[in-house]
Amino acid sequence: MKLRRFSGLSFRNLRARVQRTLLTAIGIVLGVGIVFGVLTLSNTMSGTFEELFTRAYGSADLTVTAAGGSGGFDQKAVEEVRGYGGVGSAAPRYSLSSSLILDTGQKNGLPEVRSMRLFGVEPRSAKLATGFELTEGHFPRSGKELTLDGGSAKRSGLRIGDRVTVGTPEGPKELRLVGLLRIPGGSFGGLAFGMAPLPFAQKAFDKQGQISGIAVEAAEGVSVSDLGERLDRRLGEGLQAERSETRTQEISGQLQGFKIALLFFAGTSLFVGAFLVFNALSMTILERTRELGMLRALGSTRAMIARSVIVEAMLLGVIGSLLGVLFGYGMARGLVYLFGRAFLFEITSLVLSPFALVSAIVVGIAVTVVAALYPAMKAGRVSPVEAMRARSAGANAETGHSRVISLLAPVFGLALAGAGIPWIYYLAKNLSASLGGLVYASGIAAIIAAFLGISLVIPVLVRPLAALFSPVLRLLFGVEGRMAAANATRNRGRTALTASALMVGISLVVAFSALGGSLLGSIRDYLDGSLGSDYVVQPTQQNSDAGFSAELPEKIGRVQGVENTTSIVSTFRREGKKVDAVFGLDQNYPGIFRVNYAAGGPDAFSRLKNGDALVGKQLAKDRKLGVGSEIKLLGPKGRKKYRVEGILKNDLLGGGMGIYLSQGILASDFNETQSEFLAIKARPGSDREALAHRIEAVLEDYPQFTLYSNAEWKAQIESDFNRQYVFFYAIMG
């Protein structure tokens, strides 16, 4: 028999068993689809954030920023940079979180608030500072003028000459729209971009004499990398000159953990898909025992039989992979939509890459072929004599080779599970941000090893479990129940494979649900046990980091019925791969939030004003900190040292990794003054409904902020958590 004609059997077998072919292909479609969808989502997210930071750095060769992260620095640095040898031009800017406040006639009578990134710029260097191009009108020159990206102006129904209300920490400010901008590469999600004169931005946002960046263009013939190194040395440790590529690479690195988590779900799907392929092909071989034996009797070699099964698997892999790519594209679009809904961040287009396409197809075919190797070898071992045996006898017959595998597989499975499960438990108990990427990768490998190990042990458990549940099945379902129990024990390998595929899916759903419930329970317990406020004020736009100045807490503090208020200022400090969440607290914090110490005493809080710090329990454990230890943070005024006075048990704000300073120290060392969160405590016996109306009357001058009761705020947190968790459920599903 010629090989070409013999291989045609693979096509005929697939056509003859259409239903099984489709069911088997579904496993590959789902696995490949998730791999392609996840890679596409990952590339899209990386591309989107890289695009955002590329735009944030404008068209400059270098950008000078405060060392360690956000926060302004002294504007005097502009003249120093402009006068430095090798600098062609330099443009200052202040990048600020703001909002467009639109009177769009909403049903609740409140204005519509849209998030906006506002750049304070000098008119003559606006294009260098931001990279935005003017399409109509002119850049803001002086006074209260605004230019806005064309997409946002169109969505908001704004034209040149219109009066535009912009949210600031001191309340809304009205500016005149004088120009429209085009953002290179198109609009960035639903976020608006605007420009205003630098003096206006500094005054309105209480940043007088400060800027957040200097866009630098190298002189002709000057090496950009060399200029950056020389500027770094000249400016000192408080400032840094970065290329936009460096920052975007850092952002990509920070997204790696998210990518790994997504790829874990994709790998799990392929793992289950491989079970389905193995199971389906094993059953096909069993059904075709007579046919294969007769082919052997007619002269077919073992290699030819095995190749026919491999070809059949390859065809399944190709069909499943191609359909999987189509499914993955649709899935990626759905995930991007869900990501936008979950994190309130719109992504307008997908980033498709040849690598994602080729990787998904190659992985799908490879997994299918690998899953088919054992069934193919088993098919090749069918002897001509077996063509004369009954199918049922063939089903139960075991060769010496099979018996050895049956004995060794559970032992190997126990070893895998015994190695994987303790390591998973250890990582779960000692999980922290300090663990490296290899440790996390070993955790994923341990999960896969545990799944595979348990799958190899299941065949040994089939018979005793079937005997245990057989009476129940017979009682509930009669003859059908007895047949089900008999079928389960007739081919233990097939039963084990089916059970293993179900086990992987169900265990992930149960584990993920338990994790979500545990996290949400921890948040509830913290709020119930720590929060002593009655109301909370936060930005109306949930994805906004727009802040308010000290004026708002002072106004609300004077409202009749308010006993106390406390605000929290937050920032992130970055040095190398280390990123610290830092919070600034005022003196009223302990009166509204209950503070529990793992080390240090209640008087530790009073020493924050002296420049000391409190830290979260997990951070103290990871960095081996105790009361009296010293921590260092990098900022626009160089590296600052703080003495640890207390270690907090209940550090939900920082997830156990927070660093707490006084607001005065945060302002003086890092130029961070604006808060996004205000907690309000009512005076005992006050009319809560009347008090809420009085506070809302104050907030009429701050439409970018909303008042929540404690119950409303907790419900909002739970809603946000569930909305974001749905995104991961969708991937798992």
Image (cartoon, rainbow, N blue to C red):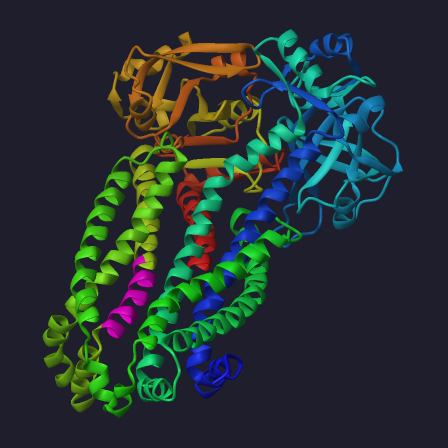
In which quadrant will I find the C terminus? bottom left
Q: Is residue 538 above or below residue 512?
A: above
Q: Quadrant of residue 233?
A: top right
Q: Is residue 132 above or below residue 324?
A: above
Q: Is residue 433 above or below residue 203?
A: below
Q: Is residue 470 above or below residue 709?
A: below
Residue 557 locus on image (x, y percent) = 48, 25
Which residue does the image show at 40% across and 21% down from the upper left?
A: 660
All told, the count of numbered labels is 0
Q: Quadrant of residue 236?
A: top right
Q: Assign the magenta stretch its main secondary structure.
A: helix
Q: Is residue 361 magenta?
A: no
Which residue does the image show at 48% across and 63% down from the upper left?
A: 364
Instruction: Choose between 69 and 547: the one closer to the eye.
Output: 69
Instruction: Choose between 311 and 242: the one closer to the eye.
Output: 311
Instruction: Choose between 523 and 331: the one closer to the eye.
Output: 331
Which residue does the image show at 77% across and 28% down from the upper left?
A: 196
Q: Which residues are magenta?
A: 493-507
Q: From this viewpoint, is residue 228 visible?
A: yes
- Compared across the picture, whether 177 is left or right of 475 comes to right
Residue 122 locus on image (x, y percent) = 80, 21
Residue 10 locus on image (x, y percent) = 47, 80
Q: Is residue 503 magenta?
A: yes
Instruction: Choose between 188 and 110: the one closer to the eye.
Output: 188
